[in-house]
Image (cartoon, grey):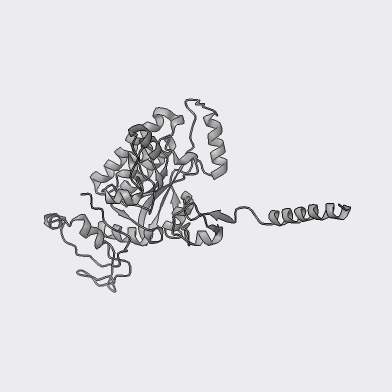
Amino acid sequence: MSWLDKIVPSMGRIQRKDRRSSVPDGLWRKCPKCEGVLYLPELEKHQSVCPKCDHHLRLTARKRLAWFLDEGDRDEIAADLEPQDRLRFRDSKKYRDRLLAAQKATNENDALIAMRGRLEGMPIVAVAFEFTFMGGSMGAVVGEKFVRAAALALQERIPLICFSASGGARMQEALFSLMQMAKTSAALERLKQAGVPYISVLTDPVYGGVSASLAMLGDLNVAEPRALIGFAGPRVIEQTVREKLPEGFQRSEFLLEHGTVDMIVHRHAMRQRLGAVLRKLTHLPPVGAPEVITSGESAEDGEPMWETEPLDAELQQEPPRHEEFIDTATEHPLEEDQPRRGR
C-alpha cells in the first residue's frame, strides 16, 4: 500500500468528522413513538406534537404556560421559593447536589411554576409541573407554590388550572413531601367549598403522590392523548399481582373507558376547549358573542347594568348530566373528545 492510500482514508475521516461537528447540537429530536427524526424549531411550532404520528411529546413547564396563557399580563407566583435539604438526605448522592444539578439543568428553582394570567381574556391561575426537574417530584416547595396559587384563585375567585407531569412525592424529603398531599388537597377543598372551578390536566406521566392527590381532584379531569397515569408503574403492578396487564393499561384512553378521567383533549385544542368549559362554569358568554344590555343604562349613557337569573332559580333547575355539559361546552366539539362512560 502506497503512502497516498494511507493518507486519503484518514483525510476522509477528518472531513466526515468536520461535517458532523458543523451541525449544531439541539436541532433534532427523535419521536419516541414513530422514531421519526424531527427538526426542533418545526416541532415547537406544533407545540411538541409529532407532525408524523401525532404523538404528544413532553413540554417544559414554561413553554406549556407560555403557549396556554394569553400573551402579556402574566405574573409568576412565589418564584423566589427554593427547596431546602432539612434532612441532609443522602442516597448514592447528596440531595443538595441533586438539587443544584437539577437547577443548573433546568434553570428553575423547583419542579412547579405558577402564574396568574388570562385564557381567552378570562383571568385564571395556572400551574405546571417541570418533569425534567427531578422527575417533577413534589416536595415542600412544590406543595407551597400550589397552595399559594390556589389561595390567589380563591381570593380573586378565578379558576385554577393545573398541568401535572410527575413521578410522585420526592423521596429525598420523606414526610415533608408526603405532607404535601394533604396540604394541596385541603387547599382544593377550600376552592370547592367556595365554588371556584379547578380543572386538572394530566399529561405524560402522572404517578405516585401527585396522582393520589391534586391531579385527580379536579371538577373536571382532562388528559392528553396516550398519557401514562396511575399510582404505581405497570411493571411494579405486574410483579406484585403476577398477571399480565391489559393492553393500553394506564394510558389515558384506557382510563377514559373506565371512568377515571372525564375527557381527552388534543394539545392543539386545549386552549379553546378549556376556555369554553370555563365560560360555561363562570356563566360568561362565548368568545365573540355580542354583548347585550338587558336593563339599566345604555352603553352610550354610562356603564351598563346586567340582568341575570337569581342563583336560587338556577339551583332549582335540574342540573344537566355530565355528558350534556361536555357536549355543549363548545360550539364545535372535537371528534376525539369523548365523555367518560364509567359513571
Residue 160 can be seen, yes or no:
no
Residue 256 can be seen, yes or no:
yes
| 42 displayed left or right of 204 | right
Q: Is residue 135 above or below residue 116?
A: above
Q: How many numbered dots are placed on residues in this image?
A: 0
Q: Hey, which quadrant is residue 284 in on the image?
A: bottom left
> Residue 280 placed where, x, y %?
26, 59
Q: Hey, which quadrant is residue 102 in on the image?
A: top right
**Could you say which is closer to the camera, residue 310 or residue 93?**
93
> Residue 200 placed where, x, y %?
33, 49
**View extreme (left): residue:** 316
> Residue 114 placed where, x, y %?
42, 47
Q: Hey, which quadrant is residue 236 in on the image?
A: top left
Q: Is residue 36 above or below residue 229?
A: below
**Could you say which is closer to the camera, residue 317 or residue 320?**
320
| 101 displayed left or right of 258 | right
Q: Is residue 270 above or below residue 210?
A: below
Q: Is residue 69 above or below residue 134?
A: below
**Could you say which is closer to the camera, residue 97 or residue 3?**
3
**View extreme (bottom): residue:** 300
> Residue 183 placed where, x, y %?
34, 36
**Could you say which is closer to the camera, residue 277 or residue 136?**
136
| 94 displayed left or right of 6 | left
